[in-house]
Amino acid sequence: MKKSMTLSYEVGDGLYLNITNKCPCNCTFCIRNNGDGAYGSDPLWLEHQPSFEEIAADLEKRDLDSYKEIIFCGYGEPTCELELLKQVSAYIRSVTKTPIRINSNGLSDLINKRDTAAEFKGVCDVMSISLNASNSAAYHAVTRPSFKGVDSFAAMLDFAKRVKQYVPDVMLTVVDIIGEEEIERSRKLAESIGVRLRVREYIPE
């Protein structure tokens, strides 16, 4: 495992922020299992948990206005460092109008042991939540969350329902390798809670 302090990396016209390696899940398809980086980036395994000052210094080197979107998504779940995430988002908001997206597993409430939905008001323009499967059993088999005695699938859906009150665009996502029938079931599930479904192409790194 190679480590570095890659705090931001470019994919297409987006800038991705790698603010933590912490994650309560061990998804079967996670790109962390396949290498040290993503989409040609330098290693995303961090030498240490970065501070706000380190991340701000990294962002100061970037022309944030030049990106179509700035995305909290690296080798970890960004809501594991929720206070840092909010602090970095506020900094980004202060220097650019570029939209902000958070890619999340939707387990922020379980991670932070409180109702966090309202805390995302003004923090991001888009919240992308990994659905992964259309039912609890399949979800737990694929996502393998670390929370014992808790239906993480139900917690994720409940968070998605509530956070849409505070974030303009909330979507659930699945990867295309789950098959058309499962994608359609997932689409109906997303619609039932009032959000859209995005099907992501699975690209192993």
Image: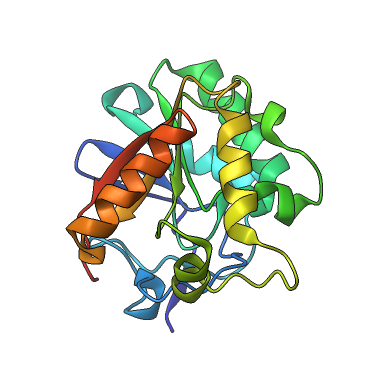
Q: Residue at x 40, y 60 (%)?
A: 133
Left or right of residue 85, residue 177 in this image: left
Q: Position of residue 112 (x, y in %)?
A: 76, 51
Q: Residue extending furthest right? A: 114
Position of 112 relative to 39 (above/below): above
Hey, which quadrant is residue 111 in on the image? Answer: bottom right
**Closer to us: 71 or 2:** 71
Hey, which quadrant is residue 164 in on the image? Answer: top right
**Closer to us: 6 or 87:** 87
Left or right of residue 54, residue 100 in this image: left
Position of 82 relative to 137 (above/below): above
Q: Residue at x 59, y 65 (%)?
A: 23
Position of 141 relative to 103 (above/below): below
Q: Residue at x 73, y 54 (%)?
A: 110
Q: Position of residue 156 (x, y in %)?
A: 58, 49
Q: Position of residue 46 (x, y in %)?
A: 53, 67
Left or right of residue 116, residue 37 in this image: left
The C terminus sits in image quarter: bottom left
The N terminus sits in image quarter: bottom left
Q: Residue extending furthest bottom? A: 1
Q: Residue at x 44, y 52 (%)?
A: 130
The answer to whether residue 62 is seen in the rendering is no
